[in-house]
Image (spheres, rainbow, N blue to C red):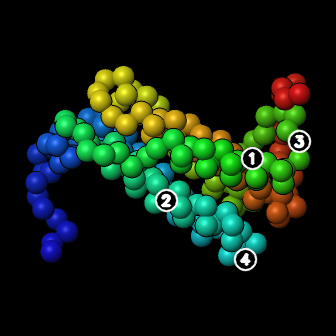
Amino acid sequence: MKIYTRTGDEGKTSVIGGRVDKDDIRVEAYGTVDELNAFVGDAITRLDDEKYADLIGHLTEIQHELFDAGADLAQAGEKRQYKVNAEMVRRLENWIDQYEKECPELKRFILPGGTRGAAALHICRVLVRRAERMVVTLCREQKTNEEVRRYLNRLSDFFFVAARVANVRENVADVEYKRGGQVFK
């Protein structure tokens, strides 16, 4: 099988149910989810296998679910059965609650960074927010799995807490944003 097909040379691409312009909001949405998935893979490489085995396992599961989300978003026209569901969102909430227990109380906004792993997870957080914004637009303009929007919303919270955990496990304090007051009580 050849990797190139030449079918996209005129600016169109195939989605489940037809062909669309490569800059269609549907393609932007699942393309950004794909970009996020690549950065999750990068974040995994920055985490020590033993110290972060639990987190790496969760991140790997998330990578599979991001493929599922991309498949759901790529469905145009008549829908097939969607893969992303409410149970995935609930599981993310459980993971967030679990990891939050490791973190010190949050009183101020924090700056992205700390360890290399935390910085990579913060990049994932902002990329998932960009994907979420595109999915919000897609949900408004076309039919798609709206559970993907909820999943991405919760996933950004997961990455925020995971970044904090990466700092905690390396004994590196989060850097608080000092130009604002206490916002979390």
| Residue at mark 4 to residue at mark 1: CA–CA distance | 22 Å
| Residue at mark 2 to residue at mark 4: CA–CA distance | 19 Å
SS under mark 4:
loop
Quarter of the picture holding the C terminus? top right
SS under mark 2:
helix
Q: Position of residue 90 (x, y in %)?
A: 60, 44
Regarding residue 20, the answer to whether it shows in the image is yes
Q: Which residue is mark 1?
A: 97
Q: Earlier in the sequence, mark 4 or mark 1?
A: 4
Q: Earlier in the sequence, mark 2 or mark 4?
A: 4
Mark 4 and mark 1 in contact? Answer it, CB < 8 Å: no
Which of labels 2 and 1 is toward the front? 1
Q: Residues within 10 Å of mark 2 (few under 14, many from 20)?
A: many
The amino acid type found where label 4 is placed reads Glu
Mark number for residue 63?
2
Q: Earlier in the sequence, mark 3 or mark 4?
A: 4
Mark number for residue 50?
4
Task: Say which residue appears at 88% left-offset and 41% top-offset.
Answer: 105
| Residue at mark 3 to residue at mark 4: CA–CA distance | 26 Å
Mark 2 and mark 1 in contact? Answer it, CB < 8 Å: no
Q: With respect to residue 62, does 185 lie above or below?
A: above
Q: Position of residue 176 (x, y in %)?
A: 84, 39
Regarding residue 113, the answer to whether it shows in the image is no
Q: Residues within 10 Å of mark 1 (few under 14, many from 20)?
A: few
Q: Which residue is mark 3?
A: 105
